[in-house]
Image (cartoon, helix red, strand yellow):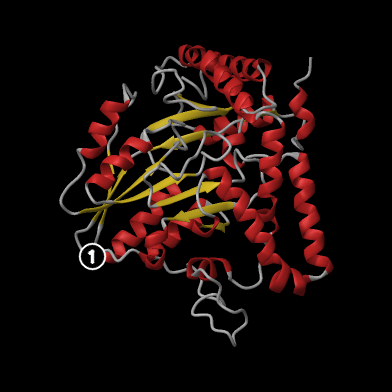
Amino acid sequence: MQNPFKQHFLLNPEITYLGFGSFGSCAKPVFENYQKWQRELEFEPVQFITVNGYEYLKRSREALGKYIHCSPDDVVYTMNPSYAINTIAKSMKLQAGDEILATNLEYGALDKTWNYYCKKAGAIYKRQVITLPLISKEKFIEEFFSGLTPKTKAIFISEITSTTALKFPVKEICEIAKEKGLLTIVDGAHSPGHIPIDLSTLKADVYTGACHKWMLTPKGCSFLYVKRELQHLFDPLIISWGYDSAPDSYREPSHSQFLDWHQLQGTRDFSAFLTVPKAIEFLNEHNWEKVAADCRALVQKNAQRFCDLLDTKPLSPINDEFLGQMLSVQINTTEPEKLQRHLFEKYKIEVPVMRHEHYMFIRFSIQAYNSQEDLDILYNALKEIKAEGILIK
């Protein structure tokens, strides 16, 4: 029996698609909504960009704000979380010797972002080493804060990591950090549509998430949340019409400098941002909490099986506390890029095989359209490749 959710996605049916966590996949109704906005833009570009579009963005932010539990005036859309974190890092008035505390398991592109801006300021991006496998939340929190010093100015941490696919205890981390007077910055790239988000209770000063991953929107749709009383600290990454706006300028200032500075950036196609209400509607119509729970169950059911095949241990306890809809397994290969291409070209499997420091990981994602059959295809392919002893030892 074919998985009924497959009909809702545009993915190539000839590919066993286990790479959802990389770039997501847009649900058909959401993609159709995206094209509707693009057609309206092309039909009357001036009205769309200078007049109607900003009312459309407001409605979209209202839907997003309700979904993640924050005021729509405290969130702006960005192309991706990297754009959002660059906005934050560039504006932080770091001094020589200041420290940003993170883990050694953060997303590589954002490691580069923090390294760049810290180096320019003579500050330190401190990647606190986290022992794998994780044992407990308490042990993780203890290890993380062992990197704290009097020079720590902010913490930066993933809610769900990229290469290791682990859920971190961000709520507890942020609570402790706020007690210590630190700025809290959370990379929630994998969170929207994957796990519940409540920014009204999470003590994050800054939070970014990608809608184009687990929320099923088109590519290039993410958001940046900044706590109201801190918004004035962060300049726009691009200085354009919204900056220092005046009544006689291209666009009059609104009630929010934060929105003006970060939203009014000249000519760009923000159609993807406008699909968020449709995406939320799609998730609600299909009881996505149950869908996500079923996906997590499938991940957990197969976790030990893949670890046994690849002669390794799980990166954490196999439960909802540490795992969502992705699983990373350490894999003994010296050529992860070749292994990934081999899986795609010979076996028609789309799954990332990634480097992280001295580790190599294969990470599968389980979305609504996936089934046990998909994981069996991957398992049998890896078993065959391992038996050959070339790309997997």
The structure residue drawn at horizontal position 74% and vertical position 35%, both measured from the top left corner, is: 11
Q: Quadrant of residue 216?
A: top right
Above or below for 222 versus 328: below
Above or below for 223 versus 161: below
The structure residue drawn at horizontal position 56% and vertical position 27%, both measured from the top left corner, is: 364
Q: Disc 1 marks which residue? A: 95
Residue that lies at the very extreme toward the bottom in this rendered image? 248
Q: Nearer the viewer, residue 354 or 170?
A: 170
Tell me if 174 is positioned left or right of 36 in this view: left
Is residue 103 visible in this depiction of the protein? no
Q: Nearer the viewer, residue 48 or 265?
A: 48
Q: Amino acid at mark 1?
A: Gln
Is residue 126 visible in this depiction of the protein? yes
Which SS class for mark 1? loop
Tell me if 377 is positioned left or right of 138 in this view: right
Q: Quadrant of the N terminus?
A: top right
Above or below for 111 versus 305: below
Q: How many marks?
A: 1
